[in-house]
Image: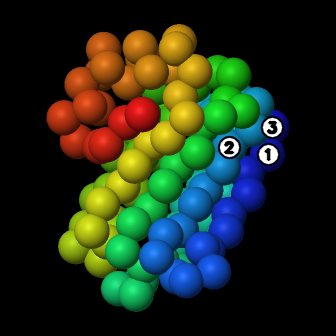
Amino acid sequence: MSLTKSLAADGSSFTIQIKGKFDFNLVQDFRAAYADVGDNTPKVIIDLRETEYMDSSALGMLLNMQKNLGSKVSGIRIANCRPQIKKILQISRFDKKFEID
């Protein structure tokens, strides 16, 4: 399991990519990853392309991120979800809070 972060060259988006399991073991790393996001970053992307597993603590981390970033960003997108991850997000009604693809 690992987490990487990157800022687009033009500064238009900030991406956090999660590989493997998105669970309680990533709480500190995930929080630290978006801690520096400020008003100059319009969009945050959570890339789940290589995420194999997500539990309820991951859902909580996403909600906390949304609460902490608030109006600092124009939007948060959860991208590249595998079908089983997308289903968890839809059942949890995260499609009402986040842009999901």
**Front residue of this view, candidates 53 and 17:** 17
Quick check: 44 left or right of 42?
A: right
Quick check: 71 left or right of 28?
A: left
Label 2: which secondary element: strand
User: Which residue sits furthest bottom?
Assistant: 40
Q: Amino acid at mark 3?
A: Met
User: Which residue sits furthest front?
Assistant: 10
Q: Amino acid at mark 2?
A: Ile
Rounded to the nearest whole Å, what is the CA distance between mark 1 and mark 3?
4 Å
Task: Return the disc, 1 or 2, that comes first in the chain's sequence.
Answer: 1
The residue that disc 3 covers is 1
The residue that disc 1 covers is 2
Q: Is residue 28 visible?
A: no
The quarter of the displayed image where residue 70 is located: bottom left
Label 1: which secondary element: strand
Marks 3/2 in contact by CB < 8 Å: the verdict is: yes
Examine the rendered structure and indicate whether residue 19 appears above or below residue 83: below
User: Which residue sits furthest left?
Assistant: 96
Marks 1/2 in contact by CB < 8 Å: the verdict is: yes
Estimate the x, y position of residue 14 in percent, counting from the top left. Answer: 53, 68
Estimate the x, y position of residue 21 in percent, counting from the top left. Answer: 71, 29
User: Which residue sits furthest right?
Assistant: 1
Residues packed near mark 3 inside 10 Å, few (<14), some (14 to 19) or many (20 plus): few
Residues packed near mark 1 inside 10 Å, few (<14), some (14 to 19) or many (20 plus): some
Task: Return the disc, 3 or 2, that comes first in the chain's sequence.
Answer: 3
The label on residue 18 is 2
Rounded to the nearest whole Å, what is the CA distance between mark 3 and mark 2?
7 Å
Q: Quadrant of the N terminus?
A: top right
Marks 1/3 in contact by CB < 8 Å: the verdict is: yes
Residue at the (60%, 74%) spot, across then down: 8
